[in-house]
Image (cartoon, helix red, strand yellow):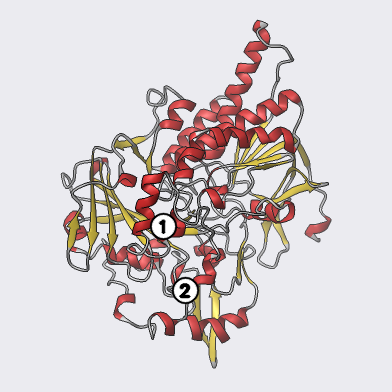
């Protein structure tokens, strides 16, 4: 049986939201609130028109449950949740603790210099420290209680476009073996036809990437650029640290890569330790997992983490290009919000409240479109206008040139960054172009290290408590994929991997992937790339950083991937 010949069920809906994260769930909740407000106004006679009865609002989430694929720092500005659900604390919103104290250090290999002041981007007092996976599960409960349909374990794999208009999405088939053939438990995906489709499916959305190429949504924009972040949660002995302290550091262990760390103390004597690295690094040996392990060898961290046991691990990419890298936010039949369109304040490492606010604005616009029965590009432009008038624009505008400056190096960029701080984001050459994609910046081993086996690139010895090898860390994510399913990591030309990439670059995918997916193994006279796709934690760094742009991250069968609980 050919999958192309299958007759697929068609499901009509009013609004389809792709992605059950902070942006998508905020959008869904706002849609229901706006519909209720409209219906009450019509019933009271304060507004004309007809009520919207039994609206079909569908949220698709590719994880086994909402929150399973959600990962962030996460220190959250509460401004959006306060607006969306004013009594969120009374309803049990899962705040771990609030930020009470802060510190900032520059680290050398053995020493540290504590800043007497906290740099403005790192002011966090009053913000919530949360687990994004726990938060999104809570938001899903609120949405379902309002009558919103959340389909977890369903992946949108193809956008439906008719005559240049987005009209919905196709969900992925289930029960296909690794050869692409139906198994006994085969279930075909369905065609979900929507009046308006909202993309809220996170960083490096394969769906929006396709739509943008077909409909020109990225014309005139800077290329997207990304950071890769990994984090651990560490259980400490009782009474080790007070909850609510936030530490950021620069310097060690990084030498050839721009990045920084975040350290948050939680309740119940737990601590989050994480590191973010720019993916436009020149370093072919870039390895966020290794750098995180090295960070923990520093005396400052050793003191903090004494007696600790790592209990959770995760990794993801985040968009870093800011305002000038945002794609067009709308076209006929669709809108996009959150990380999907680079709505992250990379200077502050804040994106949750921006994603939520964008989802809310998209939701308001979608309801107005339903009332007017107008889903045209010109009508949905209202969403873009709302974003421009909101704090999304005002915050991202201040950091519009931040990545472009900092990618030149911490000290080389200092004059430009200080100027941006004084002028609200302006610097010489504004708008500053990003002239490269991340993978294009990678240099050879000879240019960067001379040889691959230098001491700086050695992983600290694993002890199964505070230090882990990469595969053991992946175990802590709970990642699962059906081993008899098609590989979703498509390598275009494996000859490049063995003949060119390995000798010149030492196979960067073997290093930057935080989940040990890629390995160069001996296969006769030369190496061969082995893809351990069941390890994949869906960070998508391989789609971004392969120096030959040779890997395409596609959507796997629904339910596969990490099973985050408390990160």
Is any part of residue 463 visible from this angle? yes
> Where residue 270 is drawn, which disc sits there?
none
Quarter where residue 53 is shown? top right
Front position in the image: 467 or 436? 436
Going by the image, does 227 lie left or right of 36?
left
Report the residue marked by disc 2: 510
| Real-space CA distance between mark 1 and mark 2, rounded to the nearest whole angstrom | 17 Å
Residue projecting furthest to the top = 45
State left or right for residue 352 relative to residue 108.
right
User: In the displayed image of the protein, which residue is found farthest to the front?
Assistant: 428
Crowd band around label 2 with a 10 angstrom C-alpha radius: few (<14), some (14–19), many (20+): many
Dot 1: within a 10 Å radius of its alpha carbon, few (fewer than 14), some, or many (20 or more) residues?
many
The number of discs equals 2
Q: Which residue is mark 1?
A: 229
Residue 69 in percent (x, y) is at 50, 49
Q: Compared to 23, does 420 lie above or below? A: below
Residue 392 drawn at (x, y percent): 50, 38
SS category of the residue bearing label 1: strand
Q: Position of residue 285 (x, y in %)?
A: 42, 74
């Amino acid at each position: 049986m050919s999958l192309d010949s299958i007759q697929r069920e068609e499901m009509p809906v009013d609004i389809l939201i792709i992605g059950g994260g902070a942006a998508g769930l905020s959008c869904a909740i706002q849609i229901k609130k706006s519909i209720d407000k409209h219906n009450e106004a019509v019933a009271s006679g304060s507004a004309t028109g007809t009520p919207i009865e039994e609206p079909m609002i569908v949220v698709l989430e590719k994880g086994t449950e909402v929150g399973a694929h959600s990962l962030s720092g996460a220190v959250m500005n509460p401004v959006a949740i306060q607006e969306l659900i004013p009594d969120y604390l009374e309803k049990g919103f899962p705040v771990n603790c609030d930020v009470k104290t802060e510190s900032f250090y520059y680290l050398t290999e053995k020493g540290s210099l504590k800043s007497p002041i906290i740099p403005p981007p790192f002011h966090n007092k009053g913000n919530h420290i949360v687990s994004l996976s726990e938060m999104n599960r809570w938001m899903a409960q609120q949405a379902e209680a309002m009558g919103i349909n959340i389909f977890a374990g369903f992946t949108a794999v193809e956008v439906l476009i008719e005559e240049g208009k987005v009209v919905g999405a196709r969900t992925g088939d289930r029960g296909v073996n690794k050869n692409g053939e139906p198994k006994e438990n085969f279930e075909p995906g369905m065609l979900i036809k929507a009046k308006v489709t909202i993309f809220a499916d996170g960083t490096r959305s394969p769906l929006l990437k396709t739509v943008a190429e077909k409909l020109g949504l990225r014309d005139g924009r800077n290329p997207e650029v990304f950071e890769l972040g990994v984090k651990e949660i560490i259980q400490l002995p009782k009474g080790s640290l007070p909850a609510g302290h936030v530490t950021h550091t620069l310097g060690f262990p990084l030498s050839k890569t721009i990045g920084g760390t975040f350290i948050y103390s939680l309740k119940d004597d737990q601590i989050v330790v994480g590191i973010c690295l720019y993916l436009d690094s020149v370093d072919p040996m870039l390895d966020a997992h290794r750098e995180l392990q090295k960070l923990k060898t520093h005396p400052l961290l050793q003191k903090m983490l004494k007696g600790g046991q790592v209990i959770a691990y995760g990794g993801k990419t985040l968009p870093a290009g800011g305002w000038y890298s945002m794609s067009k936010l709308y076209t006929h039949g669709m809108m996009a919000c959150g990380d999907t369109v680079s709505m992250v304040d990379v200077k502050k490492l804040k994106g949750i409240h921006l994603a939520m606010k964008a989802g809310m604005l998209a939701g308001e616009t979608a309801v107005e479109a339903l009332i007017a029965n107008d889903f045209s590009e010109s009508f949905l432009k209202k969403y873009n206008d709302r974003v421009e008038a909101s704090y999304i624009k005002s915050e991202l505008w201040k950091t519009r040139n931040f990545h472009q400056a900092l990618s030149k190096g911490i000290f080389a960029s200092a004059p430009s960054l200080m100027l941006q701080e004084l002028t609200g984001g302006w610097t010489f050459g504004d708008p500053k172009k990003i002239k490269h994609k991340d993978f294009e910046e990678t240099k050879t081993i000879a240019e960067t290290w001379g040889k691959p086996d230098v001491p700086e690139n050695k992983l600290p010895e694993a002890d199964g408590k505070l230090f882990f090898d990469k595969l053991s860390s992946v175990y802590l994510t709970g990642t699962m994929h059906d081993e008899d399913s098609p590989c979703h990591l498509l390598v275009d030309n494996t000859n490049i991997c063995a003949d060119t990439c390995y000798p010149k670059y030492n196979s960067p995918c073997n290093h930057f992937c935080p989940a040990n997916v890629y390995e160069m193994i001996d296969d006769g006279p030369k190496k061969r790339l082995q893809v351990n796709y069941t390890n994949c934690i869906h960070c998508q760094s391989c789609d971004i950083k392969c120096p030959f742009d040779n890997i395409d991250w596609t959507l796997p069968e629904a339910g596969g991937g990490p099973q985050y609980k408390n990160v």
